[in-house]
Image (spheres, rainbow, N blue to C red):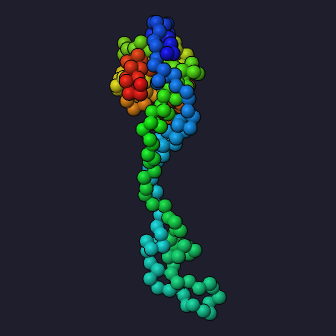
């Protein structure tokens, strides 16, 4: 089992914690992580784009000009795609871009991403993230003590104090363990997680 240090908010160590191999020590599968990121980004697409096809464009019920004698190419309707303000060929329509990912692949991708952070020594386990007040200044001081600038902060459940304190710090994001994503884990340089959140993650993926 990988052993990592546990830190206090002042940056000093408060012992160590044993992480489960099946979550934080698996063989990294880049293919699974790639699939998880593609699925995550696809799900974020709105899919609301829309344009009119030739059958939906207004007008065009009459032949625009006679067939012969004008010197122009023959036309049957002003709604044709080649005409100005005509319909769009293969017009985009509202659709759902979300992708289905196999449950085992999702779990493998998550464990691979967590294991990657352990290997890169980018995982920081906190004893807790209790603050005297939910202030940006206090959170900035904690991050400075941990030498973490671009960081993902993971708590066990939504911690309003942590969310408020980190909201205005550029390059920092907070998330509960329940909504953790592979995309966020790999996007940020440091992965800061509380001891309770580690247990919550291990309960789900171990």
The image quarter in which residue 202 lies: top left
Q: Nearer the viewer, residue 16 or 143?
A: 16
- The residue at the point 49 percent across, 7 percent down is 12
Query: Residue at the spot x=47%, y=41% of the render?
Result: 40
Find residue 144 and report its horizontal and vertical position in percent: 53, 15
As rendered, which of 20 and 134 lies closer to the eye? 20
190 in relation to 46, above or below: above
**Residue 105 pos. (x, y %):** 47, 37
Which residue is depicted at the point 55% across and 27% down? 27
Q: Considering only vertical position in the picture, is 74 above or below 179?
A: below
Q: Which quadrant does the C terminus fall into?
A: top left
Is any atom of residue 171 visible in this view? no
Query: Does any portion of residue 80 appear in the rendered image?
Result: yes
Quarter holding residue 74: bottom right
The extreme bottom residue here reads 69
User: Is 78 left, or right, of 175 in this rendering?
Assistant: right
As drawn, is 134 to the left or to the right of 142?
Answer: left
Name the residue at the right extreme: 71
Report x, y in % for residue 59: 44, 78
- Who's the residue at 50% across and 86% down the image? 63
Q: Is residue 149 above or below residue 105?
A: above
> Which sits in the foreground, 128 or 110?
110
The count of marks equals: 0
Residue 13 rendering spot, x and y as whole percentages: 49, 7
């Amino acid at each position: 089992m990988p052993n990592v240090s546990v830190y206090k908010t002042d940056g000093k160590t408060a012992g160590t914690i044993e992480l489960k191999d099946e979550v934080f020590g698996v063989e990294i599968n880049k293919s699974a992580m790639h699939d998880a990121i593609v699925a995550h980004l696809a799900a974020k697409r709105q899919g609301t784009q829309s344009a009119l096809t030739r059958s939906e464009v207004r007008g065009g019920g009459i032949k625009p000009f006679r067939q012969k004698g004008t010197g122009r190419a023959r036309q049957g309707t002003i709604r044709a795609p080649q005409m100005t303000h005509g319909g769009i060929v293969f017009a985009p329509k509202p659709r759902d871009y979300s992708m289905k990912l196999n449950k085992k692949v999702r779990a493998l991708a998550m464990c691979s991403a967590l294991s990657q952070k352990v290997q890169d020594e980018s995982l920081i386990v906190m004893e807790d993230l209790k603050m005297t007040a939910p202030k940006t200044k206090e959170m900035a001081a904690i991050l400075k003590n941990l030498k973490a600038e671009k960081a993902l902060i993971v708590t066990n459940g939504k911690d309003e104090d942590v969310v408020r304190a980190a909201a205005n710090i550029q390059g920092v994001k907070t998330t509960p363990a329940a909504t953790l994503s592979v995309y966020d884990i790999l996007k940020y340089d440091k992965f800061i997680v509380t001891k309770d959140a580690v247990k919550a993650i291990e309960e789900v993926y171990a």
